Image (cartoon, rainbow, N blue to C red):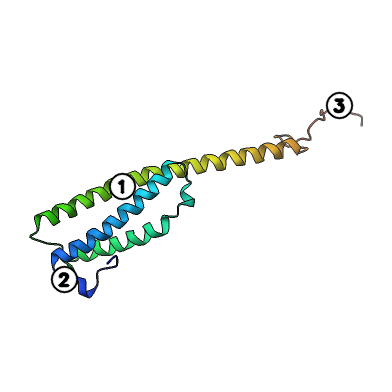
């Protein structure tokens, strides 16, 4: 069911094809909502367990869109309720993905702030134990310049 359109799908009625696509969209919505919930509580984006499945489902969705765009499959049905459900699911997917983009950006920015804080702490520790100052001179020694030069 949650697979790329096949030869069987291309022979199926428009209603059956829409049903298959709606099932794929619903699975994608569910994964994205779960990821959004995890990101909302502060989980770093790199630790999301949803990434692999979301990518797989998004890839399958892309194939469906490509097949429909090239008219290899037809997504037409006289069933108005099915058409409305399909359009509703598409809109729901769009909204979930919009939220996902926002939450992923926030998670990436938070990760970057953590990295910056760790790097600043490392730099501070290094500078505390380094015998050199920021200008490259040895710390704690006053430079003396003599004014009397003998030849």
Q: Which residue is mark 3?
A: 146
Visible residue check, residue 69: no
Q: CB atoms at circles 1 and 3 under 8 Å apart? A: no
Instruction: Categorize mark 1 by other alpha carbons within 10 Å: few (<14), some (14-19), many (20+).
Output: some
Q: Earlier in the sequence, mark 1 or mark 2?
A: 2
Q: Earlier in the sequence, mark 2 or mark 3?
A: 2
Horizontal placement of 32 versus 122: left or right? left
Residue under pointer 1: 96
Cα gap from disc 1 to disc 2, whole angstroms: 29 Å
Closest to the observer, 59 or 15: 15
CB-based contact (under 8 Å), mark 2 and mark 3: no
Query: Label 1's element?
Result: helix
Query: Which of the 4 image quarters holds residue 3?
Result: bottom left
Q: Gap between marks 1 and 3, in whole Å?
A: 73 Å
> Do we see residue 83 in this rendering?
yes
Crowding at label 3, few (<14), some or many (≥20) Cα neighbours within 10 Å? Answer: few
Disc 1 vs disc 3: which is toward the camera? 1
The quadrant the C terminus occupies is: top right
Residue positioned 36% across, 62% down in the render: 56
Task: Name the image quarter holding the N terminus.
Answer: bottom left
Image location of residue 103, percent across then percent down: 39, 43
Vertical placement of 147 versus 13: above or below?
above
SS class, disc 3:
loop
* Position of residue 90 measured from the top left corner of the image (x, y, whole percent): 22, 52
Q: Which residue is most to the bottom?
A: 7
Q: For residue 7, which quarter of the picture? A: bottom left
Q: How many marks?
A: 3
Residue 5 falls left or right of residue 51: left
Which residue is denoted by mark 2 in the rendering?
A: 12
> Looking at the image, which is closer to me, 44 or 132?
44
Identify the residue at the far top of this view.
147
Q: Which structural element holds mark 2?
A: loop
């Amino acid at each position: 069911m949650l697979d790329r359109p096949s030869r069987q799908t291309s022979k199926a009625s428009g209603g059956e094809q829409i049903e298959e696509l709606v099932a794929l969209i619903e699975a994608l919505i569910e994964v994205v909502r779960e990821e959004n919930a995890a990101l909302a509580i502060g989980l770093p984006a790199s630790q999301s367990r949803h990434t692999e499945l979301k990518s797989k489902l998004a890839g399958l969705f892309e194939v469906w869109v490509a097949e429909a765009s090239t008219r290899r499959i037809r997504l037409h049905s006289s069933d108005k309720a099915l058409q409305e459900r399909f359009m509703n699911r598409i809109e729901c997917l769009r909204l979930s993905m919009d939220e996902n983009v926002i939450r992923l950006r926030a998670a990436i920015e938070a990760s970057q702030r953590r990295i910056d804080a760790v790097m600043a702490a490392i730099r501070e520790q290094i500078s505390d134990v380094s015998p050199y100052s920021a200008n490259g001179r040895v710390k704690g020694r006053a430079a003396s310049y003599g004014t009397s030069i003998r030849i």
